[in-house]
Image: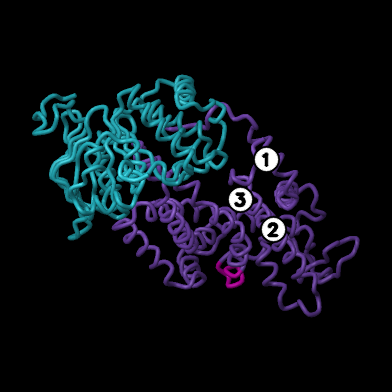
Amino acid sequence: MSGETTPDRSRPAGPVPAIEIGDLSIAFGSREVVRVEHLEIRDGEILGLAGESGSGKSMTALAILGLAPTVGATVRGTIRFQGQDLLDQTERRLREVRGRQIAMIFQSPVGSFNPVFRVGDVLVRSLLLHGAPNRREARSRAEDALRGVLLTPDLLERYPHQLSGGQAQRVAIALALALQSRVLLADEPTSALDVTVQAEILELIRSLRDERGMSVLFISHDLAVVAELCDRIAVMREGRIVEEGPADDVLRRPRHEYTRALVAAVPRVGRAGAES
Amino acid sequence: MIEHALAPRSPSRLARLAAVLRRNPLLTAGAVLSLLIVLAALLAPLVAPYPADASVATHPTQTLLPPSSLHPFGTDQLGRDILTRVLYGARISPLIAVLVLVIACAVGIPLGIAAGYFGGVVDDVLMRITDVFLAFPALLLALAFAAVLSPSIGNTTLAIALTWWPWYTRLVRGQAASVAGRQYVEAARALGVPHRRILLRHILPNSITPLIVQVSLDVSAVILTASALSFLGLGAQDPTPDWGLMVSQGQSYFTTQWWLVTFPGAAILLTAVAFNLLGDGLRDVLDPRRVPTR
């Protein structure tokens, strides 16, 4: 994108990172909860960020959107996106980046929608906020986006509580689609869903990457899910990245003992070849 | 960037309201009673038997007459027709109550949602100011204000409103703080929605319900507070047919001439019930989860 970042050190020559985090430090008062020296989400890849709850995964995602301060954290370091450091931007500029360029979806799909409004209201207003010329146009974009995630446009008439978890998560993804976000931050997007629906959502996320070149940061405590979906995996523990690499490498030959423990906790993945 | 309600809304609001009214007889009752009070206020000069009795007229020969066909509610210690005064009273007490509550909401709600949503320093400053107002007993504070402001209905309204808003700030702040932590608020921020709009569209509608119920319950409390001020000579003054004033003036006759207190008292009760039912029903209408859309 920006083209001014240095080529990747020893890694196989990949595309330029969509987002590059450097020396990120997130602290509540004097307590540092995240310390990331380097992490990049490359263009068009799905990066898995795994780790137990409280390890700082979600805070990292919030920091990318400049939202960590709203929960009382102080953030230092750099987060480069399209040649700019997001941590240097004004609130006004950040609001333009949020949603339009970097979208985020959350763990509780239905809870991500204000119960007071119809789903269509939410989508249309978000599109108007991010440059749709008028309501009619926004409406038709929202309908298209819904079709893009295999939902029928009549869902726009529903209230959030009338959607299933899977439908609601699709709608949330549809919004990212309609806004043509370049990067999707998915914070445990399937953890609240049952297994079959979870598989559908994972498939949908994969297709966004394949068909639209979206870059995805996929956050999950569930290594099985991460393993299924991601190109690369970063493992986070107590605010630090303890291991990072191509998904297969990390799963087959975990170097850090914490990763080993995580892999061991998911028998089917790590030892698929060894057993059965 | 002000948003209007979205275009396609298949069952219209009116249709929804009609459906709610049909399914909720208590709300209907509240609406009918409230309408009755408004009608009484509007039509008092036409339907009251002795309009002059609502102002300065007195009839020294007809004092304390019990209810009869001439005076369905009897007459008071100055010979005035109580039915007339109760009807005209619908122009005063409910109006005071509504004004007080509107002012209290106008001040209390914005401060409450701001304190609850932003937290931190904003919260601390706003809530300490609120606490200062709450530190004094409401009636005492209202008394002090009323005394400084010179007695009149307008000033009574202002004095009561000044003591009323901090309760609403408190109530709304607690709700707003809990709503601020919900995921859809985080999602809205992650979408780049500005604070002002988050406050208006996400925090406000989701933290207002307990307040609506509280406000409806407070109608009677305000009327009683206003009458207490009247009783102490700081509110409505004598010829004014204020229900509270009538109750307090009739107190000394209660054991022998029950009608002096009973009818204006019943009017206060009726108003309170009407608004309570209305508030309850309103809560149902405002919560989409309780209304099947089709």
- Dot placed on the residue nearer the N-terminal end, 3 or 2: 2
Would you say residue B10 sits in the magenta stretch?
no
Which chain does tag 2 point to?
A: B
Q: Nearer the viewer, residue A43 or A231?
A: A231
Q: Which residues are magenta?
A: B228-234
Colour of chain B, in one word, is purple
Q: Tell which subunit mark 1 falls on.
A: B
Nearer-the-camera pick, B160 or A46: A46
Please give left or right for residue A7 compared with residue A209 in the image. Answer: left
Which amino acid type is marked by label 1?
Leu
Same-subunit check for callouts 2 and 1: yes
Three-letter code, disc 3: Arg
Subunit ID for the residue under disc 3: B
Q: Spot the cyan chain and give its letter.
A: A
> Which residue appears at 77% of the width and 65% of the height?
B263
Residue B252 in percent (x, y) is at 72, 78
Q: Earlier in the sequence, mark 2 or mark 1?
A: 1
- B61 or B287: nearer the eye? B287
Q: Nearer the viewer, mark 2 or mark 1?
A: 1
Disc 3: CA contacts within 10 A as few (<14), some (14-19) or many (>=20): some
| Residue toward you, A61 or A195 | A195
- Residue labelled with disc 2: B271
Residue A114 falls left or right of residue B92: left
On residue A150, which mark appears?
none
